[in-house]
Image (cartoon, grey):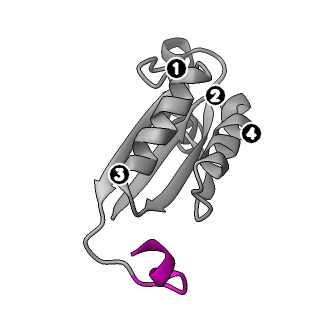
Amino acid sequence: MKLMVIILKHEQLLDQVTSILLEAGLYDASVLDGENIETLADASMPLLSSFKSLFGDEFSYNRTIICPVRYTEAIRDVLDIFNQEGIDFTDPETGVFFTLPCSIFTGDNVEELL
């Protein structure tokens, strides 16, 4: 069992990424709204608004997608489809993709995932 995490910097890719997850049979994903630390620093510490000159005028928001995945093959399938669709996580502007081992899992759909 793995926990797949996608931090998507290009929010415009969200529909395409979620469609790919559904195509791969990963229906238990959750999408979270996020914002980069520069945005928080600017809002909470106005003296540090000089961050704008370092990071540009627009601070970015992101979407974080988390999904429990039973089979490693499903993760490989998702990565293959991302590559076919031109979604390149080696480009830091796209975001990041990683998995974590999940040693304990319980929930109403535990039978489906384990």
The residue that disc 2 covers is 10
Viewer-closest of 6 and 78: 78
Q: Which corner quadrant of the image does residue 70 belong to?
A: bottom left
Q: Is residue 108 magenta?
A: yes
Q: Indicate the quadrant containing the C terminus: top left, top right, bottom left or bottom right.
A: bottom left
The disc, 4 or 3, on the residue closer to the chain's N-terminal end is 4
Residue at image x 30%, y 54%? 100
User: In the rendered image, which residue does mark 3 sit on?
Assistant: 72
Residue at 51% x, 23% y: name it.
83
Q: Quadrant of the N terminus?
A: bottom left
Tag nearer the camera, 4 or 3: 3
Residue range in magenta is 106-114
Amino acid type shown at disc 2: His
Q: Place residue 86 in its image quadrant.
A: top right
Element at badge 3?
helix
**Residue 27: image x %, image y %?**
62, 62
Q: Amino acid at mark 1?
A: Glu
Describe residue 16's horizontal placement relative to residue 69 as left or right.
right
Q: Nearer the viewer, mark 2 or mark 4?
A: 4
Looking at the image, tell me whether mark 1 or mark 3 is earlier in sequence order.
3
Residue that carries the numbered disc 4 in the rendered image: 15
Q: Earlier in the sequence, mark 4 or mark 1?
A: 4
Tag 2, which secondary structure? Answer: loop
Task: Give the structural element (helix, strand or loop) at label 1.
Answer: loop
Q: Nearer the viewer, residue 72 or 36?
A: 72
- The Cα–Cα distance between marks 1 and 2, rounded to whole angstroms, is 7 Å
Numbered label attached to residue 57: none
Q: Label 4 sits on what residue type?
A: Asp
Residue wearing tag 1: 93
